[in-house]
């Protein structure tokens, strides 16, 4: 089935302008026609009222004028008033004037009927019908209606053609933006749309699009860096494995085979860890959901994770303190992994003989903020905004690379998003706080 092509913005605006012009002009013309018709009707009514006064006077005075009958006076009255008709009947319907029954053409007549008792004949009641031929007025209204209809259609057509030109001219900035967008590609995402001279309504669109280009450019740069980081992280252990195996094969007598196997096993574990972490991040990006279970005390979970890091904390003289608590539904294994990454990161960067603090702060009935704070060097803002990127390390020397491969905080951020939250980070005056906001269902109870 063929899909209908949607109307362009130019067509929509032009047709709407044409329809509104036709309706507006039609309404104006209709008002003019109705006012003219009302004026003509009022004039006819006034004319009939004036003639009624004359007819009443003639019927009341005709008998008092010597040699004058009512019929003669009424005939004199109609001289020069060919567009008027006068019919006088008695109360029982007998025709008094004119002598012959007049032709009936009610469609072209405006009539006024009244009764009168002439003073000369107090016993006789006359029923008078005074009519006026309005054919000329009707012809005038028909011509006016035709003129107004043609004027409305022609006026709407003229306005529509003018509006079409105005719309075409008004959409010129959009066409220029479209031309700029067509020139963009993956190789020149650093370019930005030129927003100078654009209408006020398009400025927010240009700004948002330029912001999108910036994020895409950054994403491409991160992707390129990610590929390089993956290659570096995998290349190092692979090179170590190759070198140790080649040495063992070339000089089997001088190599301690169990030591070589043990070293190779460590490198294989490191490779497995990198691959598993990348697989986890890939699944998180695809929208993997968490399996929530009721946790009666979040502080207890933090303490259990802290006990796992007790040796590392004691080695650098750090004290860990937990404040606050909350009960809710979380994916406990994922939460423990995120907390372990945060505490391990704080242990690695904290100043010796200081305190690491884990604050559990309820933010709402279904939201909690877990923040791990350590005392050390202040993290620059440009580094702070990238600490959750994959394979990102603040130090170019890749210290501790044998244990950490730059995915810990990225995994923490993914776990926060999987819980409907987000990661947080701030650093000022030597105090760095990295945490995550999580959403939970406080009503969910343990089965």
Image (cartoon, rainbow, N blue to C red):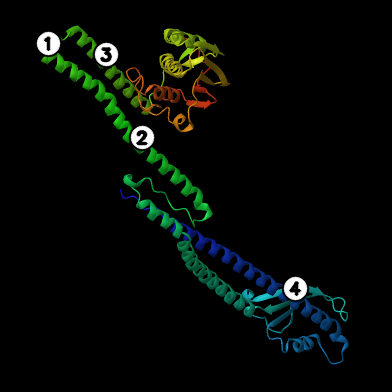
Q: Going from the N terminus, do you reach mark 4 or mark 1 first?
A: 4
**Nearer the camera: disc 3 or disc 2:** 3
Q: Which residue is drawn at 53% across and 72% down?
A: 150
Which residue position is annotated with label 2? 222
Residue under the image location 44 percent in, 30 percent down: 383
Residue 194 placed where, x, y %? 44, 53
User: Circle 1 — which element?
Assistant: helix
What residue is shown with label 1?
Answer: 252
**Residue 284 got which mark?**
none
User: In screen coordinates, is 153 left or right of 219?
Assistant: right
Relative to 142, is 295 above or below? above
Mark-to-mark CA distance, 4 and 1: 137 Å
Q: Distance between the residues labelled 3 and 4?
A: 120 Å
Q: Which residue is drawn at 35% across and 52% down?
A: 182
**Residue behind mark 3:** 266
Where in the figure is residue 118, as x and y percent of width and height? 85, 79
> Viewer-nearest of labels 4 and 2?
2
Query: Does 346 appear above or below 386?
Result: above
Q: Distance between the residues labelled 3 and 2?
A: 29 Å
Which residue is denoted by mark 4 in the rendering? 113
Position of 124 with respect to 83 (left or right) is right
């Amino acid at each position: 089935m063929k899909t209908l092509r949607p109307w362009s913005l130019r067509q929509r605006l032009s047709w709407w302008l044409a329809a509104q012009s036709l309706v507006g002009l039609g309404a104006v013309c209709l008002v003019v026609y109705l006012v003219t018709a009302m004026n003509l009707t009022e004039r006819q009514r006034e004319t009939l009222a004036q003639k009624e006064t004359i007819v009443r006077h003639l019927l009341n005075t005709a008998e008092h004028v010597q040699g004058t009958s009512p019929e003669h006076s009424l005939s004199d009255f109609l001289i020069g008033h060919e567009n008027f008709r006068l019919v006088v009947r008695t109360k029982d319907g007998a025709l008094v004037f004119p002598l012959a029954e007049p032709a009936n053409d009610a469609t072209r007549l405006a009539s006024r009927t009244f009764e009168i008792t002439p003073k000369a004949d107090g016993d006789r009641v006359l029923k008078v019908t005074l009519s006026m031929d309005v054919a000329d007025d009707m012809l005038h209204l028909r011509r006016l209606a035709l003129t107004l209809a043609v004027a409305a259609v022609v006026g709407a057509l003229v306005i529509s053609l003018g509006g079409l030109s105005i719309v075409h001219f008004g959409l010129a900035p959009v066409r220029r933006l479209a031309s700029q967008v067509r020139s963009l590609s993956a190789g020149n995402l650093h370019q930005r749309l030129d927003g100078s001279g654009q209408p006020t309504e398009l400025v927010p669109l240009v700004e948002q699009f330029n912001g999108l280009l910036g994020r895409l450019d950054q994403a491409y740069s991160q992707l390129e860096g990610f590929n390089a980081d993956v290659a570096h992280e995998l290349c190092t252990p692979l090179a170590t494995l190759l070198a140790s195996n080649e040495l063992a094969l070339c000089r089997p007598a001088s190599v301690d085979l169990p030591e070589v196997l043990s070293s190779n096993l460590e490198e294989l574990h490191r490779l497995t860890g990198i691959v598993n972490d990348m697989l986890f991040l890939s699944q998180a990006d695809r929208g993997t959901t968490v399996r929530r279970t009721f946790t009666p005390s979040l502080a207890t979970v933090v303490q259990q994770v802290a006990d796992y890091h007790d040796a590392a904390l004691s080695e650098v003289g750090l004290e860990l303190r937990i404040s606050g608590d909350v009960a809710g539904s979380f994916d406990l294994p994922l939460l423990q992994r995120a907390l372990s990454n945060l505490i391990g990161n704080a242990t690695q960067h904290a100043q010796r003989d200081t305190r690491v603090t884990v604050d559990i702060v309820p933010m709402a009935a279904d939201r909690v903020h877990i923040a791990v704070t350590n005392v050390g060097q202040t993290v620059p803002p440009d580094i702070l905004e990238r600490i959750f990127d994959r394979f990102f390390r603040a130090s170019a020397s890749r210290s501790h690379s044998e244990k950490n491969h730059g995915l810990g905080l990225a995994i923490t951020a993914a776990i926060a998003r999987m819980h409907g939250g987000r990661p947080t980070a701030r650093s000022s005056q030597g105090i760095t706080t990295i945490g995550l906001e999580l959403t939970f269902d406080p009503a969910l109870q343990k089965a």
